[in-house]
Amino acid sequence: MLRHHLFALFFLSAICLSGCGNNSEPDLIAFNGNVLTMAGQNPGETTIVSAFAIKNGNFSAVGSDAQIKALAGNKTERLDLQGRTVVPGFNDAHMHPLAMPSQAIDLSEIDSMAQLQNRLSQALNSQHPRPYGWLIGMSYDDTRLGRHPNREDLDKISTQVPILLLHASMHLCAVNSVALNNAGVNHDTQDPPGGKLFRDKSGQLSGLISERPALELLFNEQQPQPFPHDLASVLDGLEAFYPLAHSLGITSYGDALVPPELALGYLLSDPQSAGMRVNLMFDGEKMPAIQYFVELNSLLESLGLNWFSSPWLRAKTVKLFHGMSLSGRTARQFKHYHGRPNYFGEEPQRGQAELNALIEEVHQLGMQAAVHSNGDYEIDMVLKAIAAANASAPREHRHRIEHGSIVNENILQRMAEQDVVYAPHSYIYEKGPMIEPYGALLWPRMFANKSAFDYGIVNAANSDYPVSALPPLLRIQSLLSRRSRAGKVYGPEQRLSIEQALWAYTMGGAYATFEERYKGSIETGKYADFVVLAEHPGKVEEDKIKDIKILATYVDGIKRYQASAE
Ligand SMILES: [Zn+2]
């Protein structure tokens, strides 16, 4: 018997002598770098190494040049980093890649109504592509224009082509007369629940529309909606989006509002082949469909088909809305608004009992609730609902507060105790002027990124694209400096260090999707997702971080983007 075992051992070691050495050879080694691993002792800290090895899509070793070079074999690819900085692939925890047709005209830099009209007329005359017939503009900023565009402003551009301009907040839009007429929407049309058609003094529609239910009134068979909504347009949108994201260093993201039926669109977009890791956040307005999806998915999983629980596609989050808007200055606060002693914002549409029931339903489904909430009064309600749901069935839930724009000490304490993930905006660079009316006293309590680190709350950084621009390095600059484009700093108390900002954009997002053991840092065993930067973001001037060139992006050890040579 013993002899039999010894023989087996000898046989196995003989195999190893001929094969195992080659098998452990890395596919790639990278050396001579400044590698910020984001694998520090605590959140927001990092270790620094110079080299790492990759095998089968994972980091197989991390260490010094000498250690890593010693692992290389004949077939190992060698990447000399030439002293460049490497960080883990960026994870944008909350964005809307399909919110906008790719043909939308960017209006975020437009400063006057005349300039806006010029830009749109030019686009019309140059046959700019018009999805489903619409001329679409995105991200106009009323604070730069002086006011919102109205129907008359847009009728001067065209009385034939429907025009739709989306405000930077994504909660408002402006349309021309033909868009209203084609849909039979006029001054007799009633506001739908949750939406508003703005009117001028004489009761005529001004062309300004707030919230999706009112916008939906404009779409019919003759005038279909221009946003990606069917399978074909979603697949087109994602095919264009993945390479764009790679070029900015993004290797993982969360789509923060996905109708459950479009999970199939994401599956068919084949994120694995495209090299993108996606977290789907289902639209909580569609709870019956989500329930159906969860049942179907557990059936798939029982058959070993992990289509929606793979390293590439995850569908365990439900996006809910509770509370009002920050840019619209309707978010409900405990204290009155700056300079308005009797105004606290608008009461949320849902009461506490209704909110509790909704979050309980998500919790019982085994899903993670990610709740849009801005004012401290609103966030307080969400935390109460999360506490109640978890008390009835305790588990590691990692429910999330999206935006969480205005907080207080009590809220921060409870977020930490309840292990709630925080996904605040990082958009002061673009939106500084928008928070101006909240008053300087409040700024240190807005987008409380630094407090999150101090309290031990996981901070999942995000762009909320197209609400603010997509490039993670611009977002990181904004988290670090809290300086607007015009140069003003809002709430310097909440500035992050470069390590904290990088951590929030890598490990923070990984934790938010229960994937911190697999990604978010450059550590042995994790997915080999990383970005090579032309410069160390901690060693350039703060306002130049956004200009650092992304040299290459790797996902699963495969190069997905390489900057062209200068
Ligand atoms: Zn969003």
Image (cartoon, rainbow, N blue to C red):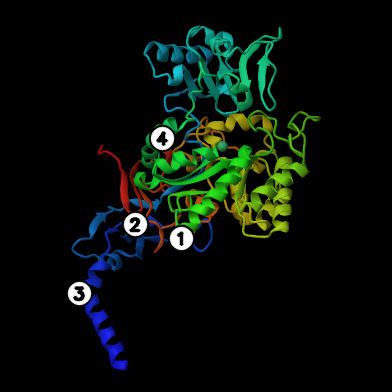
Q: Quadrant of ligand 1?
A: top right
Quick one: SS at disc 4? Answer: helix
Depth check: give the residue in front, 526 or 353. Answer: 353
Looking at the picture, how far across and down is residue 98, in whole percent? 48, 33
Which corner quadrant holds the C terminus? Answer: top left
Circle 4 or circle 2, nearest the eye: 4
Q: Residue at x 43, y 21 (%)?
A: 131
Cα separation between marks 4 and 3 = 47 Å
| Left or right of residue 274, residue 508 in this image | right
Cα separation between marks 3 and 1 = 35 Å
Residue at label 4? 235
Looking at the picture, how far across and down is residue 188, in whole percent? 69, 11
Query: Contact (CB < 8 A) between labels 2 and 1?
Result: no
Which corner quadrant holds the N terminus? Answer: bottom left
Q: Residue at x 53, y 46 (%)?
A: 461
Q: Earlier in the sequence, mark 2 or mark 3?
A: 3
Circle 4 or circle 1, nearest the eye: 4
Query: Contact (CB < 8 A) between labels 4 and 2?
Result: no
Q: Earlier in the sequence, mark 3 or mark 1?
A: 3
